[in-house]
Amino acid sequence: MKSLNFQAAIIDLDGTMVDTLGDFVVVLQHTLNDMGCHPIEIARVNRGFIELTVGKGTEDLLRRSLAHAWGLADDDAEVAAQVPEAWRHYQQHYTRLNGQHAEVFPGVVEGLQKLKAAGLPLACLTNKPTAFAQTLLERKGLRGFFDQVFGGDAFERKKPDPLPLLKTCEALGTLPARTLMVGDSSNDAQAAGAAGCPVVLVTYGYNHGEPIDRVSALAHIARLDELDLAPPISPGR
C-alpha cells in the first residue's frame, strides 16, 4: 500500500490485534452455566456465534448470548432483566480468564514496532471494558506500545458512535483528519467516517461475519505490519 502520513494512530483490540474469540466462548459458557442454562443451551454459544456477535460492547454481547441460548429475541424483556446478573458472573470469569484462550495475530507486534519507529503516538480504542483491555494488553506484551488505552466504559457512547474516536484524538492532541484508525469491522469504519478519521481495515478480523472488503476504507491489509507509514506530520498541519 502507498505510504501514509499521519500524526497518530488509534487501533482496535479484539479481532484487530488479538484473537479473543476463545476467551469469549469460555467466559460466556461459564456465565451461562451460572445462570442455570442447560448444557445444550450453553453449547449454542460457540466460536461461530461469537464471531457474528462480538464488537458492540459487553452488555450487547451478554444480551445477545442470553437470547441465543434461550431461543428468545434479542429485545425480549426477560433477557434484558437478566443482563445485570449475567454481567456480575461474566466480570468474575473474565477477570480470571482474560487472555488465557487468546492469541496475538501474526504481524501485530511487528506492525506496532513499525508504527512506533515512525514516531506515531498510539492509542488502543476498544468496546471491551477498559480494565479488561488494559489487562489483556499487559498479558500479551502489547501495553508498552500505547500512550492511551480507552475501553467501552471510558466515554458516554461506544463505537460505532464517533465520540470515542473524537475523545481519543483529544487525548492524543491530534486532528481527526490526521489520525489513522485501524480496525477489523464496519463498527470501526462507521465510527471513523463519522469522526473524520481515515481508516484502514484488517482482513482477518470478525466484522459480524460479513466480508470486510465490502466496507469502504483507505486500505484493506492482511497483516498489521503491511502499513507503510511516512514520518508523522506536525499537529498544526
Image (cartoon, rainbow, N blue to C red):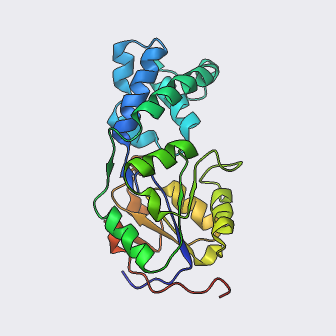
The image shows residue 67, relative to residue 130, as above or below, that is: above
Q: Between 149 and 63, which is closer to the camera in this rendering? A: 149
The image shows residue 92, relative to residue 216, as above or below, that is: above
Q: Is residue 221 visible?
A: no
Q: In which quarter of the image is residue 234?
A: bottom right
Tell me the quarter of the image containing the N terminus. bottom left
Q: Can residue 176 be seen in this view?
A: yes
> What residue appears at the point 42 percent right and 38 percent down from the top-left corner?
98
In the drawing, does residue 155 fall left or right of residue 79? right
Q: Position of residue 93 (x, y in %)?
A: 45, 27
Count the numbered circles shown.
Answer: 0
Q: Where is residue 104 in the image (x, y as percent from the top left)?
A: 33, 53
> What residue appears at the point 50 percent right and 84 percent down from the top-left corner?
5
Outermost residue, left direction? Answer: 106
Q: Position of residue 97 (x, y in %)?
A: 39, 33
Outermost residue, right direction? Answer: 156
Tell me the quarter of the image containing the C terminus. bottom right
Q: Between 193 and 170, which is closer to the camera in this rendering? A: 170
> What residue appears at the point 30 percent right and 64 percent down from the top-left corner?
107
In the drawing, does residue 159 fall left or right of residue 43? right
